[in-house]
Image (tube, rainbow, N blue to C red):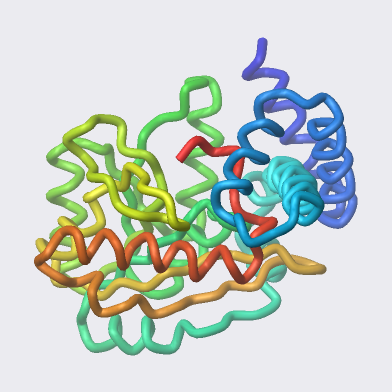
């Protein structure tokens, strides 16, 4: 029943203009704020830790804007997943900094977009198929009834999905070595202790995945941070070069550069980061 209700809401949202969906999403975020449940508590705690230089009133205001932004993200997913890719692509109003990526791929080098939980990462993931042969690891959602919607949505711009197993990883490495592209969520908490190490993020030691570092070492691909910032009328794709330490064989240096890159991205639009995520 939960899955059917979620699918119904997504379908209804897909029929609405994007501006209307976002307005409804901000209303949903306001309700989450006043309910004072777990999303608000986690958001306020994370912002307190990440921005100690802000006053309590400023932290509170940022937390409230963040929940509204989360509501916008949820409400616009119907538009992103159900509308044709051409309709979503028309709403990408600006692309900043992707020339180096296109040059690298044109020269035969693979590219990895490190896209944190910022803005609309589904839009960013769809966009990278424009760079070249795109492949991504895929794990079915917890609600299996949503799988056909999510899978179809993520593949419709041209990206091919492979399972998150040894065979899928081997396929991904081969694709990158041939000059293909992929996207990774660098701030996603690893599912098992062997998949990560502690590294400082926003001044706080956080469990950080080592997958990106290992994939860079195995594939020889170039890495870029990127996200789809929510702006009036649609999204702005922003691509940023990483610190060279990201490619270091020293895991501590590489993970520090990974977290620094995520921080550099989120400081551009901190209210659009998923602060209710328990990093």
Q: Residue at x 25, y 79 (%)?
A: 244
Which residue is at a point 67% across and 18% down the rendered structure image?
4
- The x, y position of residue 20, in whole percent, is 89, 50
The location of residue 247, given as percent across then percent down, is: 19, 72
- Residue at position x 30%, y 52% from top? 199
Is residue 76 shown to the viewer in this render?
no
- Give the percent coordinates (x, y) of residue 209: 28, 47
Q: Please give the name of the residue rendered at 80% of the width and 68% of the height, measured from the top-left corner.
A: 233
Specify whether 215 is left or right of 97: left
Q: Is residue 65 above or below residue 94?
A: above
- Which one is in front, 95 or 223? 223
Does residue 114 appear in the picture of this structure?
Answer: yes
Q: Is residue 198 above or below residue 90?
A: above
**In the image: residue 78, left or right of residue 215:** right
Q: Quadrant of the N terminus?
A: top right
Side of 18 relative to 211 (left or right): right
- 1 w.r.t. 152: above or below: above
């Amino acid at each position: 029943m939960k899955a059917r209700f979620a699918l119904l809401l997504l379908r209804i949202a897909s029929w609405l203009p994007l501006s209307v969906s976002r307005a409804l999403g901000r209303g949903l975020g306001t309700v989450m704020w006043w309910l004072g449940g777990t999303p608000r508590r986690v958001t306020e705690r994370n912002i307190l830790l990440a921005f100690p230089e802000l006053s309590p009133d400023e932290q509170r205001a940022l937390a409230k804007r963040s929940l509204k932004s989360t509501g916008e993200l949820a409400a616009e997913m119907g538009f992103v997943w159900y509308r044709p890719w051409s309709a979503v692509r028309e709403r990408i109003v600006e692309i900043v900094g992707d020339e180096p990526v296109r040059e690298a791929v044109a020269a035969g080098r693979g590219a990895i977009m490190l896209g944190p939980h910022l803005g609309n990462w589904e839009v960013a993931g769809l966009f990278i198929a424009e760079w070249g042969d795109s492949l991504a690891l895929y794990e079915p959602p917890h609600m299996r009834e949503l799988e056909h919607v999510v899978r179809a949505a993520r593949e419709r711009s041209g990206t091919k999905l492979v399972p998150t197993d040894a065979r899928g990883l081997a396929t991904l490495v081969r694709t990158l070595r041939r000059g293909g592209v992929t996207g990774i969520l660098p701030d996603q908490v690893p599912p098992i202790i062997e998949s990560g190490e502690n590294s400082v993020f926003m001044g706080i030691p956080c469990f950080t995945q080592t997958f990106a570092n290992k994939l860079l070492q195995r594939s020889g691909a170039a890495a870029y941070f990127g996200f789809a910032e929510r702006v009036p009328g649609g999204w702005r794709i922003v691509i940023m070069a990483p610190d060279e330490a990201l490619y270091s064989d020293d895991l501590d240096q590489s993970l520090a550069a990974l977290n620094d890159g995520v921080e550099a991205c989120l400081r551009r639009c901190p209210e659009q980061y998923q602060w209710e995520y328990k990093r």
